[in-house]
Image (tube, helix red, strand yellow):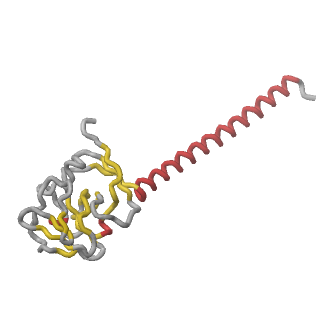
C-alpha cells in the first residue's frame, strides 16, 4: 500500500507533467496564431492594399511630399479623376486619370486640357501645357490610361511617358496619411 506521502508525491508529479504539457500546447497555439496573423498581414499588404510614401509634389496640393498613401490593388476598372499609384520608367508615381481607352486628349498652347472636346479645368490650379513626344489631339490606346499630376507645371506624367498600360496601374488611392512634422 501507498502511504499518504507517496500518494501526494505521485499526485504532484502528475500535476506537474500535466501543467508542462498544457504549457507546451499553449506556446504552440500562440506561435501558430502569430504565424497566421503575420501571413494574413503579408497577404493584405502585398495583394490587397499598397502602402507607399509620396516622393515629390506631383499631386500638390492634394497630396504632398512625405505623405503616406494607401491604395486598393484589386480594383481593375478606373474612372476619370481617380487618383492612382502607377509605375513608369521603373519608378512609382502618383497621378490622376484624365482619360481612358479611346478618349481623345487635346492640349493647346494656352494650357487648356480637353478630353473628348470637353474642358477639364476643374479644381486644378495649374495650366496643362503639352510637352515634346506626343502629338495632340491624341487618342488613348486600348488597355491604357492617360495620367496627369495635379502640379501640372512641375510633374512627369503621361505627357512624358505616354499613355500608361493598365498593368502598370498598381491601385486606386483610398486614403492619404499626412506625415509631415512627425
Q: Residue at x 26, y 63 (%)?
A: 97
- Where's the C terminus, which quadrant? top left
- Where's the N terminus, which quadrant? top right
Q: Residue at x 20, y 48 (%)?
A: 61
Tell which of 132 and 112 is nearer to you: 112
**Residue 9 spot, x, y in % from top left:** 80, 27
- Quarter holding residue 12: top right
**Residue 133 spot, x, y in % from top left:** 11, 71
**Residue 29 spot, x, y in % from top left:** 61, 44
Q: Is residue 49 above or below residue 106?
A: above
Q: Residue furthest left?
A: 109
- Quarter holding residue 90: bottom left
**172 to the left or right of 137:** right
Q: Is residue 173 above or below residue 143?
A: above
Q: Is residue 160 visible?
A: no
Marker count (numbered)? 0
Q: Residue at x 51, y 48 (%)?
A: 37
Amino acid at each position: 500500500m501507498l502511504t499518504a506521502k507517496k500518494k501526494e508525491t505521485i499526485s504532484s508529479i502528475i500535476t506537474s507533467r500535466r501543467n508542462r504539457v498544457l504549457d507546451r500546447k499553449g506556446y504552440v497555439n500562440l506561435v501558430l496564431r502569430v504565424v497566421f496573423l503575420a501571413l494574413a498581414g503579408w497577404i493584405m499588404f502585398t495583394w490587397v492594399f499598397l502602402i507607399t510614401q509620396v516622393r515629390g509634389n506631383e499631386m500638390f496640393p492634394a497630396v504632398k511630399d512625405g505623405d503616406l498613401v494607401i491604395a486598393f490593388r484589386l480594383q481593375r476598372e478606373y474612372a476619370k479623376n481617380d487618383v492612382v499609384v502607377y509605375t513608369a520608367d521603373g519608378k512609382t508615381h502618383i497621378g490622376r486619370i484624365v482619360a481612358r481607352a479611346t478618349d481623345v486628349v487635346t492640349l493647346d498652347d494656352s494650357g487648356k486640357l480637353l478630353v473628348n472636346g470637353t474642358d477639364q479645368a476643374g479644381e486644378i490650379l495649374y495650366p496643362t501645357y503639352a510637352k515634346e513626344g506626343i502629338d495632340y489631339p491624341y487618342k488613348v490606346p486600348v488597355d491604357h490610361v492617360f495620367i496627369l499630376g495635379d502640379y501640372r507645371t512641375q510633374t512627369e506624367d503621361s505627357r512624358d511617358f505616354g499613355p500608361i498600360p493598365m498593368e502598370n496601374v498598381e491601385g486606386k488611392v483610398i486614403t492619404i496619411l499626412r506625415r509631415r512634422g512627425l
